[in-house]
Image (cartoon, rainbow, N blue to C red):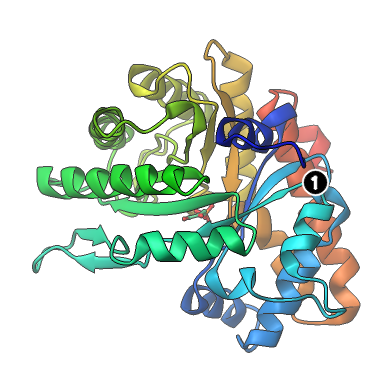
């Protein structure tokens, strides 16, 4: 890990051998929602305790190559004083940081443009000095009858490309996350179209701005039907449509595609990833960068109580292991028991 001098090597390290990413970069309000669901107060200490517990899980080793942090967490120390960044490194994973600053509505529409380019260069320099090796920026694309608009796609993909260029100039690997939301009753075909438009625009702009694709990680949504759709796509449909879409737009020399879970259940996220890797026929590593789908069982087991830590760690370790197997197309439902 110490000889990861080039950003290409960092990108390859994160997704080597089926490893994926633990997304633990919930903003304080989002973390508050997660903690509300188990009746735990979201304060700085509880957020630290929860994340320290996750990062110390046995199953981080060999299954997780990177952890995405929120601004507060990259500055925090564990209970014994060890910086959390070092706890992560000791598990063989690289620390990353979310650098976007959330969404702002476009005019009075229901679409949004991700903020955070202002002052980004200075923030990146600080994050690098705090140990970050990679970064994340999330753009959000909404599907609807006449959505996404051309403006939402173009302005969001342009911000992603500008961000990626600046991150590489600061010696870190950019994760680019153009998330087409599952929210809504749209069909899998509508998701395919919105995802296609976003990826086509994104890779054109990355190329135009001279972003080094070999040192970039893509964090996309899977191509699925909307979460309220009456006609839910099967695992095989999701796997086939997602691969078809990625193959149309993602350059062969991109090292890794690490999916977000986006509200899919933990088991669906694993089954979809496994099905895609069983199909194969692409050059990139196809792996995971899950937030909810990795953490949900651990959060439920924890309930804010120290005495539940071992059970919660087992739950995270299990999901990390299952998803690593899925990244190699080696998972089966029977391994879940
Ligand atoms: P989910 O896997 O919960 O969608 O979170 C991943 C993430 O980092 C969203 O930006």
The answer to whether residue 183 is left or right of residue 33 is left
Residue 279 % position (x, y): 57, 15
The C terminus appears in which quarter of the rendering?
top right
Picture residue at 80% right of the left edge, 46% below the top: 92
Q: Can residue 239 be seen?
A: yes
Q: Residue furthest top?
A: 281
User: Which residue is more in the foreground, 103 or 80?
Assistant: 80
The image quarter in which residue 243 lies: top left
Is residue 261 or residue 25 the one in the foreground? Answer: 25
Quadrant position of the N terminus in the picture: top right
- Residue 226 shows in the view: no
Q: Residue at x 31, y 33 (%)?
A: 206
The percent coordinates of residue 60 (x first, y second) are: 80, 50
Instruction: Answer left or right for 293 relative to 282.
Output: right
Residue at mark 1: C-beta within 8 A of ligand 1: no
The residue singled out by tag 1 in the image is 92
In screen coordinates, is 257 left or right of 169? right
* Residue at 66% over, 53% down: 294
Displayed quadrant of residue 99 = bottom left
């Amino acid at each position: 890990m110490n000889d990861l001098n080039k950003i290409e090597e960092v990108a390859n390290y994160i997704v080597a051998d089926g490893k994926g990413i633990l997304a633990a970069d919930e903003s304080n309000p989002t973390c508050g929602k997660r903690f509300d669901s188990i009746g735990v107060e979201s304060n700085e200490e509880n957020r630290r305790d929860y994340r320290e517990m996750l990062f110390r899980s046995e199953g981080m080793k060999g299954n997780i190559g990177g952890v995405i942090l929120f601004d507060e967490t990259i500055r925090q120390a564990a209970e014994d004083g060890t910086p959390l960044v070092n706890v992560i490194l000791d598990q063989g994973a690289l620390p990353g940081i979310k650098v976007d600053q959330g969404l702002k509505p476009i005019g009075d529409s229901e679409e949004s443009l991700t903020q955070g380019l202002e002052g980004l260069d200075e923030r990146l320099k600080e994050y690098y000095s705090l140990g970050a090796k990679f970064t994340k920026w999330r753009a959000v694309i909404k599907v609807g009858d006449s959505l996404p608009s051309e403006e939402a796609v173009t302005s969001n993909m342009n911000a992603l490309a500008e961000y990626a260029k600046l991150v590489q100039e600061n010696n870190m690997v950019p994760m680019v996350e153009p998330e087409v939301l599952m929210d809504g009753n749209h069909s899998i075909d509508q998701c395919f179209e919105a995802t296609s438009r976003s990826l086509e625009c994104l890779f054109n702009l990355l190329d135009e701005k001279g972003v080094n694709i070999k040192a970039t990680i893509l964090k996309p949504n899977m191509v699925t039907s909307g979460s309220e759709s009456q006609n839910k796509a099967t695992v095989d449909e999701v796997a086939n449509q997602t691969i078809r879409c990625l193959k149309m737009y993602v350059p062969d020399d991109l090292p890794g595609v690490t999916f977000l879970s986006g509200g899919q259940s933990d088991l669906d996220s694993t089954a979809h990833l496994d099905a895609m890797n069983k199909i194969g026929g692409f050059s990139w590593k196809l792996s995971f960068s899950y937030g909810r789908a990795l953490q949900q069982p651990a959060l439920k087991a924890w309930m804010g109580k120290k005495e539940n830590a071992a059970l919660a760690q087992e739950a995270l370790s299990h999901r990390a292991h299952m998803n690593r197997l899925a990244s190699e197309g080696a998972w089966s439902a029977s391994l879940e028991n």
